[in-house]
Amino acid sequence: MTDLYAVVGNPISHSKSPQIHTAFAAQTHQDLLYTAQLVPLDRFDSALNKFFEHGGCGVNVTVPFKENAWRYADEFTPRAQRAQAVNTLKKMSDGRILADNTDGVGLVRDLTVNHGVTLTAKRILLLGAGGAVRGVLQPLLEQQPAELIIANRTLSKAETLANDFADLGNINASELTALDGTFDVVINGTSASLSGDLPPIPASVLSAVTVCYDMMYSARTTVFNQWALDHGVPTVIDGLGMLVEQAAEAFALWRDVRPETATVISVLRGERRQRR
Ligand code: ATR
């Protein structure tokens, strides 16, 4: 029987995960079927029970179910345990459900491997303090930046995160408007781009060598990346590579084989250019 995988979310029709995982499966000669499943907001557990009872081997979980998935799982990878939100579930041979969060490693791989950006010993600014940011903190801190500052509209949420991860590195919290000095890497992990908004940070955080990264991606340059370009930042990157890299990490967890990502990223970028 073909092994079944799915991405579950609400909404889900926009998801690129079926295309990405289908490409990975073809490339690595894995016999699997990966679909997108729209799950009603109050039916996450029953939908997953049904999926795993009928041949489901693993799922990716997206908005708004990452915390439901955390509660649904039986076992956690250390990084999922830290994140308290998961984007990947795997049915293990004993039937128990293992949870992982591959977002952070996806972000780090996209920055360091795909774009050659060094994070070690650098000064990093991370904007936002929601689930998306919580999910990437451990892998970012594993790169041992000189300092990681979390800046958020609601300062208390940034402070909570900085406290929760303080044992993993030099991590501090700040108001968005009270940032001092320049940063080597500025990562936008807020959901502001979704509504076309810009977190109100001073342009003084940017220098001629700053790399700006928006964890969101869209057909056009995101508002945040456009702001950075307008202030002379030479390198801006959007979250398309992170999306493919987090998928590759999930695929490796499920299938014990790591797919090659560069081709898939360039196909998706090409399709996006054509739609513009
Ligand atoms: P996600 O799962 O995408 O992280 P979330 O948990 O709702 O979503 O978090 C959204 C983040 O984006 C928060 O840090 C939020 O700031 P607050 O904690 O102050 O709410 C931030 N955010 C959303 N819209 C924003 C805006 N227009 N300007 C600045 N920050 C914004």
Image (cartoon, helix red, strand yellow):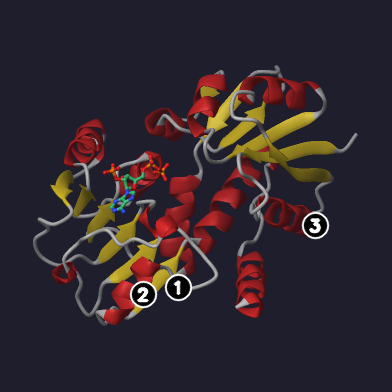
Q: Earlier in the sequence, mark 3 or mark 1?
A: 3
Q: Measuring from the top left, give residue 214's x and y in whole percent.
A: 39, 62
Q: Earlier in the sequence, mark 2 or mark 3?
A: 3
Q: Earlier in the sequence, mark 2 or mark 1?
A: 1
Q: Is disc 1 surrounded by few (<14), some (14 to 19) or many (20+) residues within 10 Å?
A: some
Taking depth in this image into account, of 44 and 260 the one nearest to the observer is 44
Across and down, in percent, residue 101 comes to 49, 38
Q: Are marks 2 and 1 in contact (CB under 8 Å)?
A: yes
Judged by depth in the image, the label closer to the viewer, 2 or 3, is 2
Disc 2 from disc 1: Cα separation: 6 Å
Q: Amino acid at mark 2?
A: Gln
- The spot of residue 260 in percent (x, y) is 65, 61
Q: Which residue is mark 3?
A: 26
Q: Quadrant of the C terminus?
A: bottom right
Q: From the image, tell me which residue sits under label 1.
A: 221
Q: Which mark is residue 38?
A: none
Quarter of the image where one finds residue 136: top left
| Quarter of the rendering containing residue 99 | top right
Secondary structure of the residue carrying tag 3 is helix
Question: Which residue: 48% across, 29% down?
Answer: 67
Q: Is mark 1 within 8 Å of ligand 1?
A: no
Three-letter amino acid code of the residue under disc 1: Thr
Q: Quadrant of residue 49?
A: top right
Q: Residue at x 19, y 44 (%)?
A: 171
Residue 216 sits above or below residue 46 on the image: below
Q: Amino acid at mark 3?
A: Ala
Q: Is residue 134 above or below residue 56?
A: below
Residue 73 in view (yes/no): no
User: Residue 226 has which mark?
Assistant: 2
Residue at figure coordinates x 47%, y 57% from the top left: 109
SS for dot 1 = loop
